[in-house]
Image (cartoon, rainbow, N blue to C red):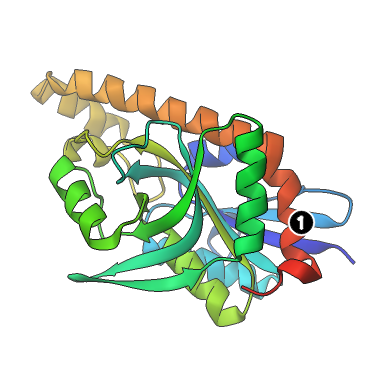
Amino acid sequence: MNSTIGLVVALPAEARTLIGRGQWQRTEGHLFQRSSLNNSTHLVVVLAGVGMKNAFLASQWLIAEGVLALGVSGVSGGLDPKLEPGDLVLADSVVQEDGNTCKQVWEGNSKFVEIVYAALIAKDIPAYRGPIITAQKPVLSTRNKQALFTKAKALAADMESAAVATVANNAGLPFFALRTVCDIATRTVPMEIFDCLNQAGHVRMFHLIRMLLLKPPLISDLLRTRKDFNAALGSLGRAWHTQISSSLPALLTRGFLIR
């Protein structure tokens, strides 16, 4: 019997980087693709859109489909000042921002994390292992990134990982989170640029064009963001296709089932 791992991604570009341009299927409001990791392990990727609610619903659907492990992957904001665009962060814990406090919602399988991390380093892929925090809203300014880093000591911030980790925990399933840094800790991304994405992760072209006409100086910010985003996707794709996809079936082996 084939075993299946579920993977949640927020953005179409992230999904294309990991599994290519295959045909998406839709059921119960969820867009998904199936692929094979090896002869006995399959992968179901759900294109969830941005944010905790979308990631939570996608994860619950994957659980109902019978997956034996859950994961999340994609780009993130760097919080640790030493991280550069394209650096990978393999989570050994996931923290959720909860008002003015932070709470840990998942602590990783150290054996799996150590093996994958060592393999990435051995292949000269820039990688770090440490906490990832899921924020309630985008963390875009250098001031907010510094404050969150001081509060949580997390390496990177996203808006989905805690939801997927929580669902995995509640179901008693293994979980992994792999993020790649897009915007670094010392760079502010204007909110206007983030607002060009809708909840499904697609670019709102009319909004983008209107923004650039009204605020031409944002063109340089947009070009820089696109450059960093492409660097992040390039690093994510290299890591996924050279190491991560072949490592994931180990999550389902007996020695890795303890979270």
- In depth, the one of 7 and 85 nearer the eye is 85
In the picture, measured across the screen, residue 7 lies left or right of residue 13, that is right
What kind of element bears circle 1?
Answer: helix
| Vertical order, 146 against 175 (above or below) | above
Residue 206: % across, % down: 26, 30
Quickly name the residue at label 1: 249
| Vertical order, 145 against 106 (above or below) | above
Residue 212: % across, % down: 17, 23
- In depth, the one of 113 and 61 nearer the eye is 113
| Vertical order, 189 against 55 (above or below) | above
Classed neighbour count for the residue bearing mark 1: other residues with Cα under 10 Å, few (<14), some (14–19), many (≥20) = many
Query: Can residue 23 be spotted in the picture?
Result: no
Circle 1: residue type: Pro
Q: Quadrant of residue 173?
A: bottom right
Residue 58: % across, % down: 53, 64
In which quadrant is the N terminus drawn? bottom right
In which quadrant is the C terminus drawn? bottom right
In the displayed orientation, state which residue is furthest to the left: 214
Residue 214: % across, % down: 9, 24
